[in-house]
Image: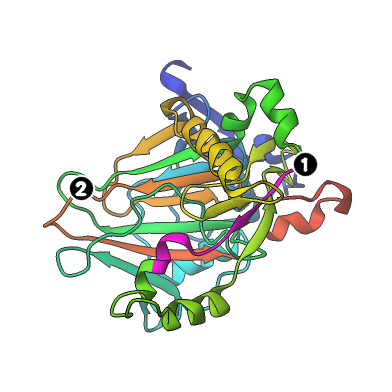
Amino acid sequence: ISGGLTRFNIATRCSTFYSTSSTLEIDTLKVKKLTPHIGAELMGFNLSKPLTQVHLDSLYQALMDHQVIFLRDQELTPEAHLSLAKSFGEPEPPHPLYDKIESCPQVTVIATGPENPPDADTWHTDVTWKAEPAFASVLHSRIIPPVGGDTLWASMTAAYDALPQGIKADIADLRAVHDMSDFRNNFTVGEPDGAATKLNAAHMSMGSAIHPLVKHHPHTKKPYLYCNPGFTVHVVGLSSIASRRLLAYLFDHMNQPEFQVRFKWTENTVAVWDNRCTMHYAIADYLPHERKIHRVTIINDRRARDIPPNIKDG
């Protein structure tokens, strides 16, 4: 169908991966690809209504196919938001610092504006300083500025595929250190010269992690780059100069528009992205207007339990 809009029967689309019951109501899901490599807008679902397992599996498969998916005009309660997130995997515990919904504390409130300026305007993959970074996030837009406030996502699968073969060979067995990077700023205000007491404590608390520069997706098995400008700080085994050169090359390569989708929000839009094989950038161009997003972060992929151990990686 023209314009990147495809239509498929949910039960038929998912039957390759999941068994379905003939007694379930069969809906039609329309999928509009937003770019060749990443991003799709889904139409035909009302997420506020009870969803069958067939519906949930089709959402998951769309996420695997497109890496980030969007559903507009979704009137969700925090409870429905959390329930949707749980269909993908285990939600993160209530965040210790961010605001949250009192009746549903696993739903984080990200409210930015003149009194609380945005701070996610750098390319990053969430919390890669952890040994086990989050699998995905589910956002629900509540207040959107009249102009600006778009978010970009980039496919690290497409970025890897476009690397020269020699670079692929060079980085195949390399690993990199990830730490809190920009978050250092939160722990240096007011510190005297020569002292870094709060910063050292933060490093002890948040820690660092070492990850391969190339991972393989547990479902698609496709290789993808696993580094990001926000949190990747050093390539293991290289000198600091050689590490900076390699990371600068990779970051410049990853930041090509051909690998990206730029999404313009409207209120009550749901976005879900696979944090393993993407990075994202929240554009901070909307002040003095406000922006409010509800977020549930998903720790692990519950369907990955069905993947044989020898192909698990990401």
Residue 140 located left or right of residue 277:
left
- Up-down relation of residue 55 to residue 198 (above or below): above
- Residue 112, position in %: x, y? 24, 64
Q: Secondary structure at mark 1?
A: loop
- Up-down relation of residue 178 to residue 259 (above or below): below
- Residue 170, position in %: x, y? 72, 32
Q: Secondary structure at mark 2?
A: loop
Residue toward you, 273 or 177 = 177
The residue indicated by pointer 2 is 285
| Numbered circle sitting on residue 313 | none
Q: Of marks 2 and 1, which one's residue comes earlier in the chain?
A: 1
User: Closer to the observer: label 2 or label 1?
Assistant: 1
Q: Report the number of discs.
A: 2
The residue indicated by pointer 1 is 173
Which amino acid, by three-letter code, is at mark 1? Asp
Q: CA distance from mark 2 to mark 1?
A: 39 Å
129 falls in the magenta region:
no
- Up-down relation of residue 273 to residue 296 (above or below): above
Q: What residue lies at 58% left-to-right and 46% top-to-bottom?
A: 227
Q: What is the span of residues highlighted in magenta in the rendered image?
A: 173-184
For mark 1, does the 10 Å Cα neighbourhood hold few (<14), some (14 to 19), or many (20 or more) residues? few
Q: Does residue 260 appear in this view?
A: yes
Given the current orientation, which residue lies at the most extreme top position?
2
Q: What residue lies at 47% left-to-right and 61% top-to-bottom?
A: 181
Q: What residue lies at 45% left-to-right and 55% top-to-bottom?
A: 47
Which amino acid, by three-letter code, is at mark 2? Asp
Residue toward you, 108 or 2 = 108
Given the current orientation, which residue lies at the most extreme front position?
194
**Colour style of the rendered protein structure:** rainbow
Q: Are marks 2 and 1 in contact (CB under 8 Å)?
A: no
